[in-house]
Image: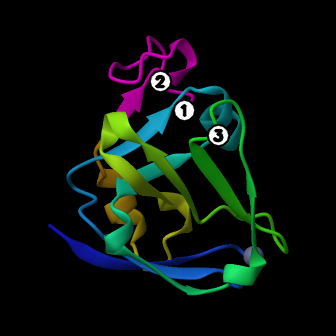
Amino acid sequence: MLKTYHGSCHCGAVRYEADIDLQAETHRCNCSFCAKARNWGATIKPSAFRQLAGEDALTEYTFNSRSARHLFCKHCGGRPFSRGDVPEIGGAYVSVNIACIDDISQEELGRLPVKYMNGRDNDWWHAPAHTAHL
Ligand SMILES: [Zn+2]
């Protein structure tokens, strides 16, 4: 069910709201970035995302193909969301960091469906052999 969630970085400088169906899918990945950042994301269209504060607090990190902009708050280092553009998944997207959603209960977090992606082997459509640590 589509629901509007609110999220922020740790210091609160960056705030957003986003319309997400978290029961549909969330994802964890073992690619070089997600593994080190322990990223847990939900991918939505940019039209479902509204940044409410902190555009000037954001800075970004990109690597490799530079198709993903890994945004983070320059005050606290929090990574409330990232942006990217990948034709294979439908073009422009926002990946909301589920760990930065403020108005979600621990119970709801614990029940979210997780899809695992084997980004480490560039095999994004399949789960890797080992997922417990992601
Ligand atoms: Zn911050």
Q: Is residue 13 left or right of residue 43?
A: right
* Residue bearing the label numbered 2: 131
Per the image, label 2 sits on a secondary structure element best described as: loop
| Amino acid type shown at disc 3 | Arg
Residue at screen point 24% across, 75% down: 3
| Amino acid type shown at disc 1 | Leu
Q: Which span is picked out in magenta?
A: 114-134
Check residue 77 in the rendering and tell me which mark sits there, or answer none.
none
| Residue at mark 1: C-beta within 8 A of ligand 1 | no
Q: Is residue 71 magenta?
A: no
* Residue bearing the label numbered 1: 134
Per the image, label 1 sits on a secondary structure element best described as: loop
Q: Position of residue 121 (x, y in %)?
A: 53, 12
Mark toward the start of the polypeptide (1 vs 3): 3
Mark toward the start of the polypeptide (3 vs 2): 3
Considering the image in quadrants, where does the N terminus appear? bottom left
Residue at screen point 42% across, 16% down: 123
Q: Looking at the image, is 5 positioned above or below residue 92?
A: below
Front of the two marks 3 and 2: 3
Q: Is residue 128 magenta?
A: yes
| Residue at mark 3: C-beta within 8 A of ligand 1 | no
Q: Position of residue 52 (x, y in %)?
A: 53, 88
Check residue 66 in the rendering and tell me which mark sits there, or answer none.
3
Q: Nearer the viewer, residue 101 or 68?
A: 68
Q: Position of residue 6 (x, y in %)?
A: 44, 81
Residue at screen point 49% across, 71% down: 101
Q: Residues within 10 Å of mark 2 (few under 14, many from 20)?
A: some
Front of the two marks 1 and 3: 3
Marks 1 and 2, how far apart at CA: 5 Å
Residue 1 showing in the rendered view? yes
